[in-house]
Image: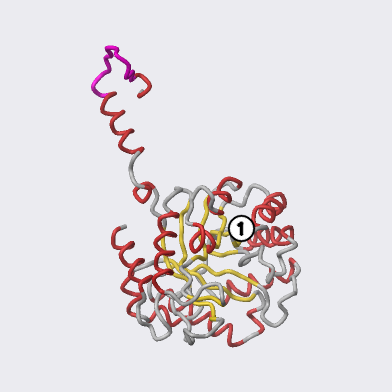
């Protein structure tokens, strides 16, 4: 309709209703991204203590994520942690997302499809009510046995669809690093068209780039079909010698993440990681990983306030 407008020195006539429609379309074109796409935002943390924290409860978030080794069933401690985490999520009305990853005792082991099926069936028994599942955490990272075998990861995805037919399954869950697109391409060919939810850990976009056009998030969206969940992302407070301790820089990264997530309506969820920070000496040459929204003692950081304000506005 709007192509009926001619802004040269010509007379033009257009019905009133079409003018109203065109005006609405023009307004929509200039709406801020946050009004066009508001993803569901939550916090991931591997420990159950987060759910009992009053600061967490005050946010009212309804999704969270936990990572477990695929052979968790060999460790009573891992089983107990899983049960406690699931109970905490249930107590707060939070939908849990569980992601498998490498074994902590045999990190190089690539499980067979049969072993994977056994692990997933055991997980569903130990975590009743679980209906949202990620096939493999950071499957393209060198620490994971799937890094050189996207085909096996695709076989895990197919097995998960058979075992948990009613589940929301994150098919390929990758880190925004150099090999991302090549790994996803090989996974896609092996997985077929049923992969409709993808996961991305967009740490580089959040903490380095901040440029949507050059972002890994945008590049991944261009090669996949379906929805994208930012299954792990956050503002890095400290990490080794790469990031000296800075809570305000981390808060800016969280703000940028939430803005980036609004760039595409296909980005449906954001899981910020993590809740608790780590206790460490700020003067140390190499610092432990820390992306906590609160410090190790539970005191809110600037990043917490960014998230709180975003949730209140959305």
Where is residue 221 shown, x and y percent of the image?
55, 48
**Corner quadrant of residue 91:** bottom left
| Residue sitting at x 35%, y 19% | 4
Which quadrant is home to the N terminus? top left
| Residue sitting at x 23%, y 22% | 16
Q: Nearer the viewer, residue 130 or 243?
A: 243
**Which residue was labeled with disc 1?**
171
On screen, 271 above or below 27?
below
Tell me the chief SS of the magenta region. loop
| Residue sitting at x 43%, y 74% | 246
Q: Is residue 292 left or right of residue 170?
A: left
Where is residue 32 shown, x and y percent of the image?
34, 47
On screen, 192 above or below 116?
above
Q: Is residue 48 left or right of residue 76?
A: left
Decide whether residue 10 is among the magenta residues.
Answer: yes
Q: Is residue 58 left or right of residue 228?
A: left
| Residue sitting at x 28%, y 14% | 12
Where is residue 288 shown, x and y percent of the image?
54, 81
Residue situated furthest top in the rendering: 11
Q: Which residues are magenta?
A: 5-17
Q: Is the residue marked by circle 1 packed among few (<14), some (14-19), or many (20+) residues within 10 Å? A: many
Q: Nearer the viewer, residue 251 or 3?
A: 251
**Corner quadrant of residue 309:** bottom left
Where is residue 115 shown, x and y percent of the image?
73, 71
Q: Nearer the viewer, residue 112 or 145?
A: 145
Q: Secondary structure at mark 1?
A: loop
Q: How is the image coloured?
A: secondary structure
Decide whether residue 237 is among the magenta residues.
Answer: no
């Amino acid at each position: 309709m709007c192509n009926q407008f001619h802004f040269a020195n010509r007379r033009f006539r257009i019905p009133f209703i079409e003018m109203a429609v065109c005006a609405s379309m023009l307004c929509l074109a200039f709406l801020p991204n946050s009004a066009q796409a508001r993803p569901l935002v939550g916090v991931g943390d591997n420990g159950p203590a987060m759910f009992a924290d009053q600061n967490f409860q005050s946010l009212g978030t309804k999704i969270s994520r936990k990572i477990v080794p695929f052979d968790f069933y060999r460790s009573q401690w891992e089983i107990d942690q899983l049960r406690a985490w699931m109970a905490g999520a249930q107590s707060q009305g939070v939908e849990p997302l569980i992601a498998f990853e490498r074994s902590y005792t045999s990190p190089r082991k690539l499980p067979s499809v049969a072993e994977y099926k056994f692990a997933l069936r055991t997980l569903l028994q130990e975590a009743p009510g679980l209906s949202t599942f990620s096939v493999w955490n950071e499957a393209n990272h060198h620490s994971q046995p799937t890094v050189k075998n996207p085909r096996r990861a695709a076989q895990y995805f197919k097995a998960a669809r058979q075992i948990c037919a009613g589940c929301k399954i994150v098919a390929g869950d990758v880190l925004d690093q150099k090999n991302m697109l090549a790994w996803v391409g090989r996974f896609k060919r092996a997985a077929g068209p049923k992969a409709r939810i993808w996961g991305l850990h967009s740490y580089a976009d959040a903490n380095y780039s901040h440029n949507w056009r050059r972002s890994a998030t945008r590049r991944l969206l261009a090669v996949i079909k379906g929805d994208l969940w930012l299954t792990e992302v956050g503002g890095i407070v400290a990490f080794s010698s790469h990031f000296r301790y800075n809570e305000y820089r981390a808060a800016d990264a969280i703000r940028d993440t939430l803005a980036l997530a609004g760039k595409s309506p296909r980005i449906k969820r954001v899981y910020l990681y993590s809740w608790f920070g780590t206790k460490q000496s700020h003067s140390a040459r190499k610092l432990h990983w820390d992306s906590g929204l609160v410090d190790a003692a539970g005191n809110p950081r600037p990043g917490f306030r960014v998230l709180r304000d975003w949730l209140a506005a959305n």
